[in-house]
């Protein structure tokens, strides 16, 4: 399967790697831009001071430092230092089998998205034709990961509001989905279950439980939508508008950018997938996009006609000539792109684009003019993973 | 669904599973104790000379079919048990360089299914309020100083717990942030399951094996 052509702009903007600007169906070998992450806080003016939060701070899931410039209440600017926990991940010169183990640990919570995008890039490079049933299993894995990730974000938003009942009920659903994931893949985070050429996947009727999760989520969602206290924290908070915004943040700003529909890498179009967009661009719109996508992902999985069992067998791949491949998938936080060059069975070089650096940049932009109590809601609404933004892959 | 969340919460009744043995995630094979024999090409040298080292293992399935998972998730080592923490146990989490999975798994123990709060386990926002530090992730240069200062800030006897293959041995991505001997309790897994984490903490606190 060929995901991309090299050429002009075809499809929506989906990210930037060191070598390429990425669109839905093409990659353009131009520029490279600097990392989009805003690391240095803006300069202080008279009467303003810098408040540093992190790298080890209560309320933050990962190690990160935020530097707020403020005269006391209003936030004039934010700098995000995401490199405290920077891991250098050296995949060049490693075998494909070793490389996939490293790639899936780049962002454990979105391991399926990373390993499927990487596997598809390798498959394109070395010319593996993957059977339809494996592609369907991968689509189900991506959607399960999306459901859990979006549940985690919505639970975090409720927790930021000290809204204990919905927060705990959403955590309960998230754990239920995690258990479903472990039943279909053998691992709670898909580790070791996805690799170039195959998957480990055991469906049976295990995914039938998703419909009851959907019903329960829908009742919580309706309850949250009727809570003025909760909504007042989200509406008008962290407004982000613009043309080149990727992932759920872009869809919340009215941009049609879902790589599942706009790229040719996986056939989500055949499932009748409906792209969710809202216009306001604020934390409320991002909450709505993610919540609606949970229900949509459940519907997609139910329509997939999944195979009962795929007993994957990892093979050593050896391909002497230098060959190239690229692929993109829509992770829960936005598109993940990999470009790989393979030679002599080893990874020769790698190029990539991840959503978290973009989301950090959007967060910093959208915090200007807000107050400190807006911070947690705005941060959580982007679904940022520092493990992903800080990693350096070579 | 009413607009009163308190009533919505009560209506769902108690969701917490009754005892610790129920926490065993059905169908979860990786990570769990593995058994088998023969030489295999292990990417992290967790299997050598026919022996298996749970602290190095990243449960990648490369050793299958020579080795197979047993489903036994009690994969931890604790130097000794300390009953002083039987009633309550406050932990401070330090992410030295994780992929995020250990972070979410330790948070999962507070999901309603497990509800570690009822077992007296709590997360603190500052090391000064903590009984123990839980270290996750590989060595990263810039996190060494915050990690050292966090350990120094914990009131004595400061207990250090290593969570996951990266913290214990460096996993496949790097090296461990602290020497193995520093850890009072070592919890294996990549990442360890909530059941493994709770079991290890209960054993460390010298509580009854059934956890009630």
Image (cartoon, rainbow, N blue to C red):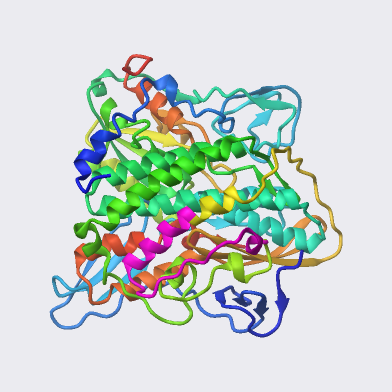
- A235 sits left or right of A249 in the view: left
Q: Closest to the observer: A42 or A5?
A: A5
Question: Which quadrant would residue B198 be assigned to in this image?
Answer: top left
Question: Which quadrant would residue A328 be assigned to in this image?
Answer: bottom right
Q: Position of residue A287 (x, y in %)?
A: 36, 61
Task: Tell me where the magenta segment starts and ends, as one range.
Answer: A267-295
Residue extending farthest to the front is: B2
Residue extending farthest to the right is: A320
Q: Is residue A10 magenta?
A: no
* Numbered disc total: 0
Q: Closest to the observer: A180 or A191?
A: A180
Question: Which quadrant would residue B84 be assigned to in this image?
Answer: top left
Examine the rendered structure and indicate whether residue B124 appears above or below residue A253: above
Q: Closest to the observer: B64 or A264?
A: A264
Q: Position of residue A100 (x, y in %)?
A: 66, 51
- B124 sits left or right of A85 in the view: left
- Residue B103 in view here: no
Q: Closest to the observer: A249 or B67?
A: A249
Examine the rendered structure and indicate whether residue A337 appears above or below residue B19: below
**Measuring 49% from the left and 29% from the top, which residue is drawn there?**
B25
Q: Position of residue B26 (x, y in %)?
A: 53, 28
Q: Is residue A282 magenta?
A: yes
Q: Position of residue A394 (x, y in %)?
A: 62, 63
Examine the rendered structure and indicate whether residue B183 appears above or below residue A236: above
**Measuring 52% from the left and 50% from the top, which residue is drawn there?**
A298
- A328 sits left or right of B124 in the view: right
Q: Dividing the image into 4 quarters, which one contains the N terminus of chain A?
A: bottom right
**Measuring 46% from the left and 24% from the top, which residue is drawn there?**
B77
- Residue A194 in view here: yes
């Amino acid at each position: 399967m060929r995901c991309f052509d090299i050429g002009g702009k075809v499809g929506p903007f989906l990210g930037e790697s060191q070598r390429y600007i990425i669109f839905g169906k093409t990659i353009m070998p131009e520029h490279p831009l600097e990392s989009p992450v805003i690391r240095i806080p803006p300069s202080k003016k008279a009467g303003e001071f810098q408040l540093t939060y992190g790298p080890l701070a209560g309320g933050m899931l990962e190690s990160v430092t935020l530097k707020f410039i403020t005269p006391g209440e209003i936030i004039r600017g934010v700098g995000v230092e995401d490199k405290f926990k920077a891991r250098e991940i050296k995949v060049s010169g490693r075998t494909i089998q070793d490389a996939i183990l490293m790639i899936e640990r780049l962002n454990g919570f979105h391991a399926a998205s990373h390993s499927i995008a990487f596997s598809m890039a390798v498959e394109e490079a070395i010319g593996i034709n993957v059977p339809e049933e494996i592609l369907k299993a991968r689509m189900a894995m991506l959607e399960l990961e999306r459901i859990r990730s979006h549940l985690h974000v919505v639970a975090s938003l409720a927790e930021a509001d000290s809204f204990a009942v919905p927060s705990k009920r959403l955590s309960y659903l998230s754990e239920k989905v995690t258990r479903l994931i472990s039943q279909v893949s053998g691992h709670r985070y898909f580790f070791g279950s996805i690799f170039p050429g195959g998957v480990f996947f055991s469906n049976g009727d295990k995914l039938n439980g998703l419909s009851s999760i959907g019903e329960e989520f829908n009742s919580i969602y309706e309850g949250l939508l009727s809570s003025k206290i909760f909504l007042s924290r989200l509406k008008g908070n962290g407004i982000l508008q613009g043309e080149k915004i990727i992932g759920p943040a872009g869809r919340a700003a009215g941009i049609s950018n879902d790589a599942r529909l706009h790229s040719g890498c996986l056939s989500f179009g055949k499932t009748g997938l409906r792209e969710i967009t809202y216009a306001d661009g604020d934390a409320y719109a991002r909450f709505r996009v993610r919540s609606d996508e949970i229900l949509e992902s459940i519907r997609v999985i139910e329509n997939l006609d999944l195979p009962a069992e795929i007993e994957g067998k990892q093979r050593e791949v050896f391909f002497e000539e230098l060959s190239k491949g690229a692929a993109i998938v829509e992770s829960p936080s936005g598109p993940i792109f990999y470009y790989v060059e393979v030679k002599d069975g080893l990874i020769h070089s790698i190029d990539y684009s991840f959503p978290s650096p973009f989301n950090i940049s959007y967060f910093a932009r959208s915090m200007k003019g807000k107050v400190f109590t807006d911070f947690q809601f705005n941060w959580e609404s982007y679904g940022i993973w520092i493990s992903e933004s800080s990693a350096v892959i070579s | 669904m009413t607009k009163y969340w308190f009533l919505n919460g009560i209506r769902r009744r108690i969701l917490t599973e009754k005892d610790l043995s129920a926490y065993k995630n059905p169908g979860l094979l990786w990570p769990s104790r593995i058994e088998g024999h023969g030489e295999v090409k292990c990417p992290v040298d967790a299997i050598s000379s026919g022996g298996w080292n749970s602290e190095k293992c990243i449960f990648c399935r490369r050793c299958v079919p020579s080795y197979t998972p047993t489903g036994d998730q009690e994969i931890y080592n604790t130097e000794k048990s300390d009953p002083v923490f039987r009633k309550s146990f406050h932990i401070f989490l330090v992410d030295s360089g994780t992929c995020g999975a250990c972070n979410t798994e330790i948070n999962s123990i507070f999901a309603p299914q497990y509800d570690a709060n009822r077992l007296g386990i709590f997360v603190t926002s500052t090391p000064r309020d903590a009984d123990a530090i839980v270290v996750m992730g590989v060595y990263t240069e810039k996190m060494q100083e915050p990690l050292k200062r966090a350990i120094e800030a914990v009131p004595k006897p400061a207990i250090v717990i290593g969570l996951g293959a990266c913290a214990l041995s460096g996993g496949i991505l790097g090296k461990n942030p602290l020497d193995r001997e520093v850890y009072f309790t070592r919890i294996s897994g990549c990442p360890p399951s909530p059941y493994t984490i709770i079991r290890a903490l209960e054993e460390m606190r010298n509580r009854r094996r059934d956890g009630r």
